[in-house]
Image (spheres, grey):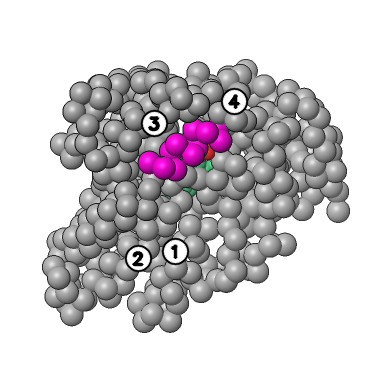
Amino acid sequence: MQTATSRTEVPEEISAVNLVDPRTYLEHDMDAYWRRLRADHPLYWHPPVDGNPGFWVVSRYADVMALYRDNQRLTSEKGNVLVTLLAGGDSAAGQMLAVTDGRRHKDLRNVMLKAFSPRALSKVAALVRANARRMIADAVRRGEGDFAAEVASVIPLTTVGGLLGVPVKDHAYLLGLTKSSLSSDEADQAPEEAFLARNEILLYFSDLVAERRADPQDDVITTLTRSEIDGVPLTDQDIVFNCYSLILGGDETSRLTMIDSLYTLSREPEQWKRLKEGSVTLESATEETLRWATPAMNFGRTALVDVEIAGGTIKAGDVVTLWNTSANRDESVFDHPYVLDLGRTPNKHITFGYGPHFCLGAYLARVEVKEMLDALRTFTRGVELTGEPRRIHSNLMTGMSTLPVRFLPDEAGLATADS
Ligand code: HEM
């Protein structure tokens, strides 16, 4: 087995796959591609394409973990997603948690964690449960519909919106913006549209921060307006960038996971039966659902010094991408990784990343998925697809933007819906 790879010596079927182009993920057998990279080219130099610089691709679980953990020799401050990494930086570096490192990252993360107090989280978790039960019961009573639009789009934004204190009347407006700022339902969305959508979100939060300073409420934005690091209050810009990151980080990822899990359950009757009958716990079903979906395919870093990994060297200044989507199917860690097993234990998936930048919203995301699965197994006897789902176009996220389904109601379960 080859462990190191030169920058160019890979077979044509590997080098022909352009990981920067969102269409690639719809057109290629990516499972086969990742299996091949894990086996033969665990550190692969993706050549420059379409005017973008080249970058390293790391695909094995152990290597991905090692690099996530290392915020000394690798930095997120030059971007943590392909679009910013390849452009050479992120304008929110040093202010937005995900693209801040060192002491400032630690301090900012502590401030944010305080805002995510158990009291704040338990309030939001109760809201998620109530929302999931109500929305799924309504969808099941209607019988047919688009699960993506009617349920999976609403729950995550309501969750993060509830945490931040975004008024309910603005949720639909923000949802429209977040949808076009990260990925796209359409292959030909212009990059300017995503840029404009991101700016609109920032402007929206600037106004909300000003409102909360004038009229404090019991929410995360108000908590952040009162927070300090080394005696210096957070600036409006600090708060705005981090609200933006919570909305973006918390919305699409959770939405895609929910859509994927219903899609998967509709195609896996044996696993659905295990969930419905209660022969697997909601917790293990939630973890396997998260591993299976892996909505955030990759994150990345820039090397500050030479880093040895997977039998090769990432040179100082090089961009390296860490592929969760591959690590979560690594056969040296997961038994039968391409089999969905809702009872899988242990299940140390890497869906939320690892190390210092481990997902701040993992608890909430887990609550969302768990409550969704619980409501589904209570209110339905099963679900059938009524059309082809539409896949999103992105080199960061994977999943579907529509999911037309028909529910088979469980009348006894539905009778408990309003209790
Ligand atoms: C970080 C995935 C839900 C907020 C991350 C990272 C991953 C991730 C992989 C690490 C990024 C890196 O290392 O560069 C996911 C997935 C989710 C989810 C798959 C849902 C299934 C959420 C939610 C929120 C959130 C609900 C907010 C309420 C954040 C934030 C960070 C982050 C603020 C940056 C943490 C830091 O840099 O210290 N997420 N996330 N995420 N996530 Fe999530």
Q: Nearer the viewer, mark 4 or mark 1?
A: 4
Point out which mark residue 286 bears.
1
Residue 83 visible from this viewpoint: no
341 in relation to 291, above or below? below
Identify the amino acid type marked 2: Leu
Please state which of residues 228 and 261 is positioned toward the viewer in this rendering: 228
* Marks 1 & 3, CB-CB < 8 Å contact: no
Q: Residues within 10 Å of mark 2 (few under 14, many from 20)?
A: many
Q: Which residue is mark 3?
A: 227
Question: Who's the residue at 54% across and 51% down the image?
Answer: 351
Label 4: which secondary element: loop
Q: Dot 2 lies on which element? A: helix
Q: Is residue 404 left or right of residue 187?
A: left
Q: Which residue is mark 4?
A: 77
Picture quadrant of residue 358: top right
- The relative height of residue 190 versus residue 320 in the rendered view (above or below) is above
Indicate the secondary structure of the residue bearing disc 1. helix
Distance from disc 1 to disc 3, alpha carbons, whole Å, reads: 34 Å
Give the mark nearer the N terminus: 2 vs 4: 4
Q: Could one spot residue 362 in this view of the protein?
A: yes
For the residues labelled 2 and 3, the Cα–Cα distance comes to 36 Å
> Gap in Å between the C-alphas at discs 1 and 2?
8 Å
Image coords of residue 76 (percent x, y): 60, 30
Percent across and percent down for residue 316 are 77, 25
Q: Which span is picked out in magenta?
A: 105-115
* Quadrant in the picture for residue 323: top right
Q: Considering the whole magenta stretch, tell me its main secondary structure.
A: helix
> What residue did someone put label 2 on?
373
What is the number of the mark on residue 36? none
Upstream in sequence: badge 1 or badge 2: 1
